[in-house]
Amino acid sequence: MRRETFSYFVPPAGVRVGTTFTLPDGREVRFEVSLIAADDAFHVAGGITAEDDLLLELPLKSLPGIHDALAALDDYAGDVTAPAARMLDGLLDEIV
């Protein structure tokens, strides 16, 4: 299984970071979180996708302060990574 970390600028003022795993059958599984500043707030999101299948979608949080947004981003990073091993194992089991 291959792994690639990524970080992208999301215009006009945001970032999306995470890791994409490529399974032996070619499917890509993406674990990501994002923080975007817009409309006088900071918007935090996160999720896990396998190709077009949404495996986990965390609710969008809109927060007025950067410190609260960074704390939410940290929480979401933990929420996205916590089930990673279990989800990848399950997807690998489907291949065998």
Image (cartoon, rainbow, N blue to C red):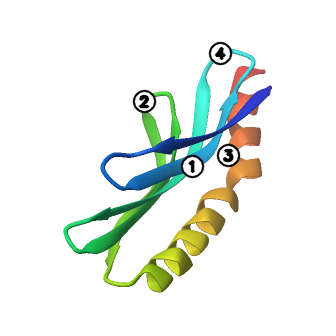
User: Which residue does the numbered mark 3 point to in the structure image?
Assistant: 87
Residue 25 quadrant? top right
Q: Amino acid at mark 4?
A: Gly
Label 1 is placed on what type of residue? Val
Asked if marks 2 and 1 touch (Cβ < 8 Å), the reply is no
Q: CA distance from mark 1 to mark 4?
A: 21 Å
Image quarter (top left, top right, bottom left or bottom right) of the C terminus: top right
Task: Tell me the crowding category of disc 1: few under 14, some 14 to 19, or many 20 or more residues within 10 angstroms, Cα based.
Answer: some
Q: Is residue 35 above or below residue 66?
A: above
The residue drawn where x is 45% and y is 77% is: 69
Residue 52's disc number: 2
User: Residues at badges 4 and 3 in contact (C-beta under 8 Å)?
Assistant: no
Left or right, 57 with respect to 23, comes to: left
The tag earlier along the polypeptide, 1 or 4, is 1
Could you tell me if the residues under marks 4 and 2 are in contact, i.e. CB atoms within 8 Å? no
| Crowding at mark 2 (Cα within 10 Å: few <14, some 14-19, many 20+) | few
Q: Residue 26 got which mark?
A: 4
Residue sitting at x 47%, y 52%: 15
Outermost front residue: 12
Q: CA distance from mark 3 to mark 2?
A: 15 Å
Pointer 4 local density, CA inside 10 Å: few below 14, some 14–19, many at least 20: few
**Mark on residue 17?**
1
Lower position in the chain sequence, tag 2 or tag 1? 1
Q: Earlier in the sequence, mark 3 or mark 2?
A: 2
